[in-house]
């Protein structure tokens, strides 16, 4: 049975005074192509949520690590707010199950698409802020962000993955990994790239991101994770 908005609210221990904000946060722009009267899409809320996420994640790191230098906090924050991290948070919240999108978008895997999920997570955060204020946004976000931070630090995910992979491959086989763009999806303002990393004739992994550089980093991280498993 499909998840309802009530199920979604219960799963995330959320409440909304203005449920229209939640519906807006869960409406992908493609939905408007088939439902012109379906209300606004979530792009404006995503813009707001992105700013709130940047502030709250910086505040969390500043408070949790009083001795940490600026450069290290910057690396950790980048690891927390990158597209695949936000997509993981969105999956845990079951956002993909309640997103409104066009049938074509859904048929091509939209409910699992990394950038789409990450954008929706930011939009939900923006909606919580507008509905209840910064304290409610902080209370909802920080437990999730702290759990993600523990994972990032445990697996050193804030380190430059491409550099790590290059060191390992140079030591093992004496070859520098090559990165190839194998796919692009979405409109120009919200493009998602897929990059493949290989060593010689061997394909190691693929990654996705909002830029070719971010997708290459994701591919390198995936290759490292597979190597450790």
Image: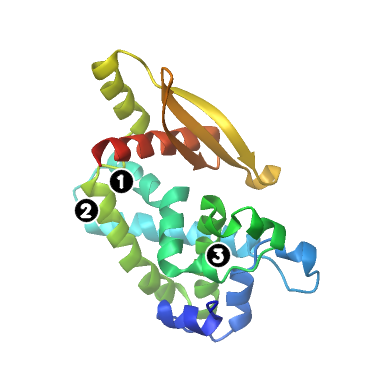
Which part of the image, by quadrant, shows the C terminus? top left
Q: The residue tagged with tag 2: helix, strand or loop?
A: loop
State if disc 1 and disc 3 touch (CB < 8 Å): no
Q: Which of the marked residues, 3 or 1, is nearer the chain's N terminus?
A: 1
Return the residue at label 1: 73
Residue 56 picture quarter: bottom left
Residue 54 in sight in this render: no
| Residue lying at 40% horizontally and 75% vertically, measured from the top left | 135
Where residue 21 sits in the image (x, y, percent)? Answer: 60, 76
Residue lying furthest right: 36
169 on left or right of 219: left
What colouring method underlies this structural image? Answer: rainbow
| N-terminal label among 3 and 2 | 2
Q: What residue would you read off at disc 2?
A: 65
Q: Secondary structure at mark 3?
A: helix
Horizontal and vertical percent position of residue 119: 55, 57
Judging by the rendered image, the residue that carries numbered circle 3 is: 123
Q: Is residue 74 above or below residue 46?
A: above
Residue at the outermost left position:
67
Q: Nearer the viewer, residue 210 or 175?
A: 175
Please tell me in which quadrant of the rendered image residue 174 appears.
Answer: top left
């Amino acid at each position: 049975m499909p998840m309802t908005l009530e199920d979604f609210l219960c799963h995330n221990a959320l409440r909304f005074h203005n449920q229209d904000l939640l519906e807006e946060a869960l409406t992908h722009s493609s939905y408007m192509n088939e439902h012109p009267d379906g209300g606004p899409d979530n792009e404006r809320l995503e813009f707001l949520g992105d700013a709130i996420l940047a502030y709250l994640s910086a505040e969390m790191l500043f408070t949790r690590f009083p001795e940490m230098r600026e450069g290290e906090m910057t690396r950790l924050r980048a690891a927390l707010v990158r597209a695949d991290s936000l997509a993981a948070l969105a999956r845990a919240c079951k956002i993909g199950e309640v997103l409104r999108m066009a049938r074509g978008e859904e048929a091509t895997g939209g409910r699992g698409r990394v950038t789409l999920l990450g954008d929706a997570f930011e939009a939900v955060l923006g909606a919580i802020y507008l509905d209840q204020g910064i304290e409610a946004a902080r209370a909802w976000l920080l437990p999730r962000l702290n759990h993600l931070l523990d994972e990032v630090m445990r697996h050193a995910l804030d380190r430059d993955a491409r550099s790590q992979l290059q060191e390992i491959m140079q030591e093992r086989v004496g070859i520098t990994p090559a990165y190839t763009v194998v796919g692009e999806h979405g409109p120009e303002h919200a493009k998602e790239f897929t990059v493949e990393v290989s060593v010689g004739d061997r394909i190691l992994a693929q990654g996705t991101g909002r830029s070719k550089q971010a997708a290459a980093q994701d591919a390198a991280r995936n290759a490292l994770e597979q190597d450790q498993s």
